[in-house]
Structures are given as structure tokens and as C-alpha cells.
Image (tube, coloured by chain):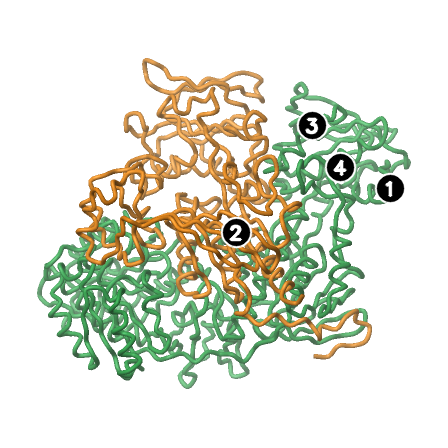
Chain colours: A orange, B green
């Protein structure tokens, strides 16, 4: 290359990257979309990565979504590519049903203690499904947010990766029953499996522990838990999904009838100092998206959204305009005051303010979907170690040790696109840490 | 070509109970190599396969068992070509056991798999480009962040900035939005510190007052010609970060707000400059304003100029309202459509709202005038302050939109590519990927966009974006050096080969490649830059004379697989349908159907393809000549919200269907015999009805008259 005079610095003499393969791995806590992305992006740059995931499968909450906004595309399309990247890349290891107990040490040299919960099914499982046929116990279907049941031995869902079954020890009588053990031809079930602890060395740590929905039953006036036809936005995702409890049909939980009308209640918990002080950022878009689910399944159905501000920043406004061009989807600026049930018709009655008309409205509908906010998954049981949190239990930079980075919703309420971007940046920071530490 | 093909037929997971294993083994003997069975090849018996490869010289391994989507690691044999024949999910689990049609399906799949293994040959990766320098174009906050991250990760960096110094718009800001709890007050920017950190790092070449004139080459080795104040430079770079940022939308677009017409109407950038300079003043007389209004004019319903809303303009108004309030005796008014303060920025909104000197109202500005004293008179309708109001202010601040620098004819890269000098953009002009799951990917391999050129964003997001795009650039360099493909077929070592003697110089491959990987030489023959290629095979689908092939994927291979299927003759109850299925969406959906034990017609023979765009129309002609009664093409959604990870695959197939229909017409066959079906990965529940309906249509038309010819 020719470098001429007057240039501030020559690009020669860069500090060469430390030989790949000699560094300590990056430990990624959480195998949702942020964790999987961070792991893959680092691994494909040549770094070893270990993912620690709490569920028996990777993919986290996006695996439970029916579609993404704004493209209305199925999340599993991207997950399939990501899982193929994991399968093809020996640099990535993962532990499911695992949780990080403790992090200690410093940049380039962390010790991570991991608790492995017993799956009772080992890697010999071929997913042949023979065990399910003989299993006598049932459990609420956690993947479907408690809607419907599975056997105590189960595959979380048909796209689950890894495609290995698991036993829910809260529902299984283990060795007292053991019918599954008898039918398993592959010696894949071990009912005596115990929890164990694993110690990992790490060059850097990425906290990608994600989010959980705010407990809607804590919002007294909205009737969740009291009226079965008041559901949350995450439940709506499962109702609309073809592999969900209703096989994709949006039915009233109370009577199984097709929903003809629905109200979406924005800020169910968010932007409310009694609940979550912040804005969850995604719920306006999620409700617009979910209104299209209802409309796709039933050409007569009507959806109405009550909101404070319709938060569809940037090009998302284009999505909002597209959805709202459907005259069966309408919106009102105003907070919902109360939800009750009409004793005669069993419909839900929504009472709300209409700020722009300076009045009140009352609507009777079949279904109410609460746009419940996103909370940090770490709001109970934080990671023990040099990780700092804000008052909402999101990880913050000041106070968190150098070499530990948060990605995605561990940091704040993000949509999927932002989580993926943030996770890629976190992987970059982890690599910078390892390279910098190795040069010391 | 495999010299010795071993066939391994698994009887586990219900396969043995559904199929006649003896017949499958007998058929496999024709492959000429070892044939073995096991109740579970994925467990201990995986050793048997490995031993054959290591000791018996088997270099083609056909495993008839579960889907290639599972046990990938168990059956990874670096020194052999492994072909997975899916007789579990797509045969035993999705068809009734021990029926002739189910058995025929398994036998056809086995024949097809053996042919495929025999036709494949090991790839020779292209490893000749391994320049470990990242070129960053644009020295604003995103570009500086990208350069810092790449340098700290051990890569050399060349940073090109058109202005005389680094920092971009970030350096023109007084403060930035709160980044730390309690998220209540704006804080100083840190761009100067980042620039200083960058300038202190070794291995970073910064060229200011400079622009890129031309880029040639490919990932791993781009040759970059740069014109700078100091002279011209030629550098080589392995990958590129495009961080050329944004510009304010032209003020003419905001004329109706009085911008450019009235002295005391300014843009938000003007106000920022005043704050940096030490005080906010009325342009008319230089005095400090008492009453200042902010109009968020790119909100909902105000689509006069930009087709999208503000990402940061609400926050800018909040921040600047506080600037105003720092001057004595001031009142600020903020008119908005919907206040966009997502996430923890809500705390900032709440804190600004608690200031009694800042009044917020939803409302739309209906008219703007100037009084003789230079004051701005606003009429605002539908306000929350009491209907329609008239307001006199000393200064009106109009939030002008952010336009990506890639909007319009200017290009910052000067790519010497046949398909154009710039990076293809979205309809809004952003150099963005169009994928929720895979940001930073542009349609030019090895070039990753970051910051406001990718999407309107604030400083904190731009810093993250720069880092992330730098990592993508690093990956591209690592992969190119190893001769491997990048996203989405990461690690693929093969790339298309051209049998140039037969090339007719039609140029179609060069036009249809979604990634601009092909150039034309002086003879008008295509020339591939292997590291620009994503291995989708769209060129292979495009070529009218079928001269393009991969070592492990070719028209000949697919055609031979089609011909390996046995076509029953004279039995109207046994039609044969070929389904060419996108490997990322439709093929996994077929697996899901099996996992859910859904049943679909056994007359369908599925061949996974890299992309429907890789399907050459001759394959459909081959299938029809072979005697297939129908062909289904199962792929993803085209159009504005396309899902094709090769961008144009489904769309191109649509246009090629014209040729196919013409072929059918020539053969006097009904057009309904060949149909494109959209099938998303989550739609396995639709498969039985979709395929049953197709079979019903085909039976209605009757057998293919070409059968037996």
C-alpha cells in the first residue's frame, strides 16, 4: 500500500490479533435471541463461546412469538438459520436448564459458576416420542403460558432446539413410575439425575438474561385473573400461533367461541409509577401487530386500541399507517379506567377516556388484550457478582465490572431488532476485552 | 465425485416399524460400497460410519435416518461428503406405516441421496484474499466507534472522513440524551474523548478532508482509492464499514412552518449550534428569547415531507426545551403528535414534564405568521390546552428530519461494480439489511452499515452500531481468509464454477446476482469474485445454458436426483409430484409436520434447494419429461416484506415461471401442473391440506402423457 506524507498515522503496525484458540471463552448468560446472536457473532469471528440457558431449549421468548413486526414474518425463520449456524460451529457450546450462580474475577479471567438442573433425559434422546405415549402425568404447558397441558416428559415445542425431551420434576413421580424408562429404546432417561455445579473460565461475560411480562394481575382495574377473556399480549401470541393451544384460532378462553371484537389496552403496567415507571417501548407495535392476527383469522372481526402515545418511532410509523389503513382497526387516545363483565351477555365492558374528544367511551367486546410491559428477568434473583443494576433491575454500565456486558432486554425494554443489534455490539465489546487482556 | 459410497440405513425412531428395511438395504447395494444398518446410528454406531471413512476409504456417506436438521454434529465427517436421507421426519413420521406408497417414497429418497453423494465432489476453497484491515467510511460517532472497536480487536483501520476533523454531527451537539440512571437529565457528549482514544491507538490511519473515489475487489481484498487534502492514497482493506451518517432534510420541506421565511424560525440543529456557542438568541435581534415553541413536525399524520416518523426528534425537543429553561424568565412550548420516548427515556420525559416552565400539548400547527416585531404567531389546533389556540413566541424551533446520506444520487463508496457504485438501499434510502434478525448485512458482501445511514438513531445507539458493524467486518475478514461464505450460508466452502466454453455472454447471471458478485470481462463473460458470493445459486438458476455449478450443488446433480425417482406407470392412483423446497423455510416446515405426526400425500418427492431462485427452469422440464405429474415450488414470501434471505430468490422464480409455462405449453401440458406455493417455516399445519389439494388437482388433470417416453 502507498501511504503518503501528511497522514496522521500509518495503518501499518497494528497490534496483531491474539492467536485465535488460545483465549478463554466468552460466557453468554441467556440463550434467547440476544444471547444466541451474541454467541454466534463472536464465534464466527473465531472466538469460543458457551451459552448458559435456563430453559430446556434455546430461542427464549422469540420462539413463543407468532410473528415479528414490522414484516409480519415468523421468528422461527431467523432462529432456524441461527440454530444451523450453532450446529455447524464447533466453537459454540451450550448448556440448557442451566443458571449462572456466581461470577468472579476480572477482564480476561472470570470464573463463572453454573448450576445445571436435572433434565432427567440425556443426550441419547432421539426425540422418538415413545415416552410421551406412556407417561401418565401432566403439567401445564409452560411454552403456551399455561394454556393447555403436556405430559410430564415433553418436547417444549416441535421446533425446539436442541431436539431433546425433558422431564418436569414438579409433575413427574420419577422412579416411582418409570414407565418412560421402560419404553425408551435408547437408554436416554435417567430419573436419578441430580443437579450439579459447573465451573467455567471466561475471558468475558455477556449478560443476556432477557425479560418477562409484568404480572397483569397486579393491575386491579383491568380484570386480569378475574375475567378469563382478559388476556395478555404474550398469551395473544400463543393463541395466534399455529402450534399454540388453539392451533392459531383466536378463541375466547371462557367459551371457545371465535372472537369478533377485541380491545387492546396499552401501557398495562408501563408508564405508571405504581407499576413500571418506564415505557416498554414495544407494546404499541405489538398491539398493532396482534390486531392484524385477529383480522387475518376473521374478516368480520374488529380491533380497537386505547393508547396514551402511539409509539411507533422512525420507519415503524409506516407499519402503523399500514395497519391503521384497515377500517376494522381503530384507535383512541385515552387510558382505560375499568374493565368489567356484562352479567347478561358475558361480554367484557371497557370504560375509557377519549382525550381528543374530551369525553368517555364504553365498549363491549369479546376479548381484552393487555399490552403488559416488559420487566427484567433478573427482577428476582440477580446474578451474583460484579454486575450493577438500576432501580428497575436492568443492568447498567457504571458499576458493572469491565469485561461483563449486557445485551438486549437485560439492559432495558427493547424490540427484537434492537436486541439483535445490541447483542452484536456486546460481542464486539467482549472480543475487545479478550484482545486487550491478552496484550497486558 | 465420490469414489466409494457407503450407505447407512437406520431403523430407529419408528423407521424400522414403518418400512421394509431389507428392501432398502438391497437397493443400497447398488451404490457399490458398504451397506450397514443400526437401530440408532446417532449413538454408539456412529463409530461404524467413522471407521468406514477412516479405514475403508469411504468418501461418500449416505445416512438414511433422521432429518439433516438434527444430529448435525454427530454426523460431521470432515473427510467425506455426507448426504442425509430424511426417512424419519419426512417418511416414517408423516406417512402410514408399511404401505407400498410409503415404501416407494423411502426408496426414491434413498436413490436420490445416493446419486447426490456420487455426484458431489469436495470443494476447493478460495483463500487468496486475507487483508486484515478494516476500512471505515465516515468519521462521525458511528464511524469512530467502529474504528475503535476494530483497532482494539487487533485489526488495522483506515478511517476516511470528508470533513477536516472527526466527530460529525455528534461534535456539533451541546448535550446528549441521558444514558445513565436516573435518566432524568441530558449529559455532555463524549465524542471528543472517543476521537482522542482513537487517535492514540496504533494501527489506525485517519484521513480527513478525504473521500473514497473507487473501490474494486472483494471481501478479503478490496482496493480502495482515496482522495484526501494530502494527496491520493491507495489502500487495501479486507472489509468495509459504511458509516456516512445523515443530513438534515432540506429546509424547503418545512416551508409551511415558516422555515427560511421568518427570521425567528430555526431548525433544531440551529438551536444546537446556539447552545454550543453559549446562548440561545433570536436571529432577528440577537436578544435572548423569552418564549420558545418546539414543533415536532414529523409525527403521525404529518407526512408532507418524510414518509416516516421521528426516531429522536421528541427527545431532541425535550433536551432543547431544557436548554431554553436554563436561560432566565423563559417558557417553552412543545407541540407533538405522539411523544416518542421509549424505554428508560420515559424518565427523561417525566422529568422535563415536571418543569412548570415547559408546557406540552398535542396539536397540529395550522398556520404560522410573523408580526412586525419579528415574533412568530402560531395557530395550533386540537390542543390539549383547550382546543384551537393562537400563541406568540419569540423563537420557533422546527424539528427537521434526519435523512440517510445514502438517500439520493450521491455515493460514498464508488464501488466499481457492474450493478452500481452504491450499496442498495431500502425504500426509505437507508443502507439497511431489511432483516429483523440480521442487521448490518447490506447487499454488498463485506460492507456493513452502521449508525444513521442504517437507521435514524441517537448517539448511544450509534456507538453500539459502530462496534457491531466492526465485528461484522472482522467476521467477513476471518471468513474470507478461510475461503468460507458469510451469512446466511456461513462456512460454506464451495462457490460457483463456470464452464465458460459454453457461455453465450447473455449476462443474466450478472444481473440476477443479488449481491453484485459477478462482473463482465472484455469478452462479456461473467467473472466471479468468490468472496462477494453468498452461495445462493441464483446464478445457477438463471443460466439459460446451465454452465454454472457448485461442487456439491448443480443442475446436473438435481436433474440426476429427479431422474432417480421411479415413476409408476399406468396407475392413476399413484401420481408423482416433485416438490422443490427452500431449505431454510419450507423444508424445516415439512420436518415440523413430521414431528407433529401430520400426514401428507406419499406421492410427493421433496428436494431441498438453497433458494427457489437457484431452480433452473430446465429442472422442471426434466421432471416433466421424466414423467412427474406435477411440480410444486415451495418457498417464502416475495414482495415488499420479502423473507428470502437471498433477497430476490422468490421474486426471480416468479419471473422465471413465465419460461416454465411456455415450456409446458410447447409440450401441450396444463399450466396447473407447475405451481409456486408460499410456505413459511411456521406453517407446517397447512402442509397436509396444501399438498392434498395439489394432488387432487393433478389427479383431476390426469396422468402426465410424457410418462414412459
Q: Nearer the viewer's eye, disc 1 or disc 2? A: 2
Q: Are marks 1 and 4 on the same chain?
A: yes
Question: How far apart, in angstroms, are the residues tagged by discs 3 and 4?
Answer: 13 Å
- For this rendering, which residue is in front, B382 or B91? B91
Crowding around mark 1 (Cα neighbors within 10 Å: few <14, some 14 to 19, many 20+) is few
How many numbered marks, from 0 up? 4
Query: Which chain does the numbered disc 4 sit on?
Result: B
Mark 3 vs 4, N-terminal side: 4
Crowding around mark 2 (Cα neighbors within 10 Å: few <14, some 14 to 19, many 20+) is many
Q: Are marks 1 and 3 in contact (CB under 8 Å)?
A: no
Q: Which residue sits at x=61%, y=75%?
A: B131
Looking at the picture, how far across and down is residue A176, in whole percent? 21, 42
- For this rendering, which residue is in front, A52 or A144? A52
Left or right of B44: which side holds B420?
right
Q: Are marks 1 and 2 in contact (CB under 8 Å)?
A: no
Residue B320 numbered mark, or none: 4
Mark 1 vs 3, N-terminal side: 1
- Residue assigned mark 2: A420
- Residue assigned mark 3: B353
Residue sticking out furthest to the top: A344
Q: Are marks 3 and 4 on the same chain?
A: yes
Question: How far apart, in angstroms, are the residues tagged by discs 1 and 3?
Answer: 24 Å
Image quarter of the C terminus of chain A: bottom right
Amino acid at each position: 500500500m502507498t501511504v503518503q506524507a501528511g497522514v496522521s498515522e500509518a495503518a501499518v503496525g497494528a497490534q496483531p490479533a491474539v492467536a485465535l484458540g488460545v483465549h478463554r471463552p466468552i460466557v453468554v448468560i441467556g440463550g434467547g435471541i440476544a444471547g444466541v446472536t451474541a454467541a454466534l457473532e463472536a464465534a464466527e469471528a473465531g472466538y469460543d463461546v458457551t451459552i448458559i440457558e435456563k430453559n430446556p431449549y434455546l430461542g427464549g421468548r422469540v420462539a413463543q412469538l407468532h410473528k415479528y413486526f414490522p414484516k409480519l414474518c415468523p421468528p422461527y425463520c431467523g432462529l432456524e438459520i441461527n440454530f444451523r449456524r450453532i450446529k455447524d460451529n464447533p466453537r459454540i457450546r451450550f448448556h440448557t436448564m442451566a443458571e449462572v450462580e456466581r461470577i468472579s474475577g476480572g477482564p480476561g479471567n472470570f470464573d463463572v459458576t453454573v448450576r445445571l438442573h436435572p433434565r432427567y433425559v440425556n443426550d441419547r434422546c432421539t426425540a422418538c416420542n415413545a415416552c410421551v405415549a406412556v407417561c401418565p402425568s401432566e403439567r401445564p404447558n409452560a411454552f403456551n403460558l399455561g394454556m393447555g397441558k403436556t405430559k410430564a416428559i415433553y418436547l417444549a415445542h416441535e421446533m425446539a432446539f436442541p431436539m431433546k425431551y425433558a422431564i418436569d420434576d414438579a409433575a413427574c413421580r420419577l422412579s416411582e413410575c418409570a414407565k418412560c424408562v421402560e419404553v425408551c429404546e435408547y437408554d436416554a432417561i435417567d430419573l436419578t439425575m441430580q443437579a450439579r455445579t459447573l465451573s467455567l473460565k471466561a475471558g468475558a461475560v455477556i449478560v443476556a438474561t432477557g425479560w418477562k411480562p409484568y404480572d397483569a394481575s397486579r393491575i386491579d382495574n383491568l380484570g386480569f385473573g378475574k375475567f378469563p377473556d382478559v388476556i395478555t399480549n404474550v398469551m395473544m401470541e400463543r393463541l395466534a400461533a399455529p402450534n399454540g393451544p388453539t392451533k392459531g384460532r383466536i378463541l375466547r378462553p371462557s367459551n371457545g367461541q371465535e372472537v369478533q371484537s377485541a380491545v387492546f389496552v396499552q401501557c398495562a403496567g408501563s408508564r405508571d409509577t405504581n407499576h413500571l415507571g418506564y415505557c416498554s417501548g414495544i407494546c404499541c407495535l405489538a398491539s398493532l401487530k396482534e390486531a392484524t392476527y385477529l383480522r387475518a383469522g376473521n374478516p368480520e372481526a374488529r380491533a380497537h386500541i386505547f393508547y396514551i402515545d402511539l409509539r411507533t418511532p422512525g420507519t415503524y410509523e409506516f407499519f402503523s399507517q399500514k395497519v391503521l389503513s384497515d377500517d376494522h382497526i381503530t384507535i383512541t387516545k385515552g387510558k382505560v379506567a375499568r374493565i368489567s363483565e356484562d352479567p347478561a351477555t358475558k361480554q367484557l365492558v371497557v370504560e375509557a377516556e377519549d382525550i381528543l374528544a374530551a369525553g368517555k367511551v364504553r365498549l363491549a367486546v369479546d376479548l381484552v388484550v393487555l399490552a403488559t410491559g416488559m420487566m427484567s428477568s433478573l427482577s428476582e434473583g440477580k446474578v451474583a457478582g460484579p454486575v450493577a443494576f438500576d432501580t428497575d433491575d436492568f443492568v447498567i454500565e457504571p458499576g458493572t465490572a469491565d469485561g461483563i456486558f449486557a445485551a438486549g432486554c437485560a439492559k432495558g425494554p427493547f424490540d427484537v431488532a434492537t436486541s439483535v443489534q445490541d447483542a452484536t455490539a456486546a460481542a464486539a465489546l467482549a472480543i475487545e476485552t479478550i484482545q486487550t487482556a491478552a496484550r497486558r | 465425485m465420490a469414489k466409494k459410497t457407503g450407505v447407512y440405513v437406520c431403523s430407529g425412531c419408528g423407521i424400522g416399524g414403518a418400512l421394509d428395511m431389507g428392501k432398502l438395504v438391497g437397493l443400497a447395494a447398488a451404490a457399490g460400497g458398504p451397506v450397514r444398518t443400526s437401530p440408532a446410528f446417532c449413538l454408539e454406531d456412529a463409530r461404524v460410519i467413522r471407521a468406514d471413512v477412516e479405514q475403508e476409504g469411504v468418501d461418500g456417506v449416505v445416512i438414511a435416518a433422521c432429518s439433516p436438521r438434527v444430529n448435525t454434529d454427530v454426523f460431521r465427517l470432515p473427510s467425506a461428503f455426507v448426504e442425509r436421507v430424511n426417512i424419519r421426519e419426512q417418511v416414517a413420521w408423516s406417512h402410514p406405516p408399511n404401505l407400498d406408497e410409503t415404501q416407494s417414497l423411502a426408496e426414491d429418497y434413498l436413490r436420490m441421496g445416493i446419486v447426490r453423494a456420487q455426484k458431489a465432489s469436495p470443494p476447493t476453497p478460495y483463500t487468496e484474499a486475507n487483508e486484515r484491515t478494516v476500512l471505515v467510511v465516515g468519521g462521525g460517532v458511528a464511524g469512530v466507534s467502529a474504528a475503535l472497536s476494530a483497532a482494539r480487536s487487533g485489526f488495522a483501520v483506515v478511517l476516511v472522513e470528508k470533513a477536516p476533523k472527526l466527530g460529525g454531527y455528534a461534535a456539533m451537539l451541546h448535550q446528549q440524551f441521558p444514558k445513565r440512571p436516573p435518566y432524568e437529565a441530558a449529559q455532555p457528549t463524549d465524542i471528543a474523548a472517543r476521537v482522542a482514544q482513537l487517535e492514540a491507538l496504533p494501527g489506525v490511519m485517519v484521513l480527513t478532508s478525504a473521500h473514497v473515489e473507487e473501490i474494486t475487489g472483494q471481501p478479503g481484498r478490496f482496493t480502495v482509492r482515496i482522495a484526501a487534502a494530502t494527496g491520493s492514497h491507495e489502500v487495501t482493506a479486507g472489509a468495509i464499514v459504511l458509516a456516512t451518517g445523515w443530513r438534515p432534510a432540506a429546509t424547503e420541506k418545512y416551508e409551511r412552518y415558516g422555515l427560511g421565511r421568518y427570521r425567528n424560525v430555526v431548525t433544531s440543529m440551529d438551536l444546537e449550534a446556539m447552545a454550543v456557542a453559549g446562548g440561545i438568541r433570536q436571529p432577528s435581534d440577537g436578544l435572548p428569547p423569552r418564549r420558545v415553541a418546539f414543533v415536532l413536525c414529523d409525527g403521525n399524520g404529518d407526512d408532507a415531507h418524510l414518509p416516516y416518523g421521528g426516531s429522536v426528534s421528541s427527545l431532541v425537543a425535550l433536551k432543547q426545551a431544557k436548554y431554553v429553561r436554563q436561560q432566565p424568565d423563559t417558557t417553552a412550548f412543545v407541540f407533538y403528535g405522539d411523544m416518542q420516548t421509549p424505554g428508560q427515556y420515559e424518565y427523561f420525559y417525566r422529568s422535563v414534564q415536571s418543569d412548570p416552565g415547559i408546557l406540552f400539548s398535542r396539536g397540529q400547527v395550522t398556520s404560522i405568521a410573523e408580526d412586525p416585531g419579528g415574533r412568530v404567531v402560531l395557530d395550533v389546533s386540537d390542543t390539549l390546552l383547550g382546543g384551537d389556540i393562537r400563541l406568540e413566541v419569540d423563537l420557533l424551533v422546527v424539528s427537521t428530519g434526519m435523512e440517510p446520506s445514502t438517500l439520493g444520487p450521491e455515493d460514498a463508496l464508488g464501488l466499481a461494480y457492474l450493478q452500481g457504485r452504491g450499496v442498495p438501499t431500502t425504500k426509505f434510502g437507508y443502507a439497511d439489511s431489511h432483516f429483523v434478525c440480521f442487521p448490518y448485512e447490506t447487499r454488498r458482501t463485506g460492507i456493513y452499515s452502521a449508525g444513521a445511514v442504517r437507521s435514524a438513531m441517537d448517539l448511544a445507539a450509534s456507538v453500539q452500531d459502530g462496534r457491531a458493524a466492526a465485528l461484522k467486518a472482522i467476521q467477513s475478514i476471518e471468513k474470507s481468509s478461510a475461503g468460507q461464505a458469510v451469512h446466511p450460508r456461513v462456512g460454506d466452502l464451495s462457490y460457483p464454477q463456470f464452464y465458460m466454453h459454453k457461455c453465450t455472454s447473455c449476462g443474466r447471471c450478472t444481473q440476477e446476482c443479488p449481491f453484485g458478485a459477478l462482473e463482465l470481462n472484455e469478452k462479456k463473460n461473467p467473472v466471479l469474485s468468490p468472496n462477494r458470493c453468498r452461495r445462493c445459486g441464483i446464478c445457477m438458476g438463471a443460466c439459460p445454458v446451465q454452465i454454472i455449478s457448485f461442487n456439491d450443488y448443480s443442475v446436473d446433480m438435481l436433474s440426476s436426483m429427479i431422474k432417480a425417482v421411479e415413476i409408476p406407470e399406468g396407475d392413476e392412483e399413484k401420481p408423482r409430484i416433485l416438490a422443490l423446497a427452500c431449505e431454510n423455510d419450507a423444508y424445516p416446515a415439512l420436518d415440523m409436520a413430521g414431528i407433529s405426526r401430520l400426514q401428507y400425500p406419499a406421492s410427493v418427492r421433496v428436494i431441498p434447494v438453497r433458494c427457489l431462485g437457484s431452480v433452473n427452469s430446465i429442472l422442471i422440464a426434466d421432471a416433466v419429461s421424466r414423467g412427474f405429474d406435477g411440480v410444486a415450488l415451495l418457498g417464502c414470501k416475495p414482495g415488499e416484506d420479502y423473507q428470502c434471505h437471498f433477497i430476490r430468490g422468490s421474486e426471480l422464480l416468479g419471473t422465471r415461471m413465465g419460461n416454465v409455462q411456455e415450456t409446458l405449453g410447447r409440450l401441450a401440458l396444463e399450466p396447473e401442473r407447475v405451481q409456486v406455493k408460499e410456505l413459511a417455516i411456521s406453517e407446517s399445519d397447512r402442509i397436509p391440506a396444501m399438498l392434498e389439494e395439489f394432488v387432487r388437482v393433478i389427479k383431476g388433470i390426469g396422468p402426465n402423457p410424457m410418462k414412459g417416453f
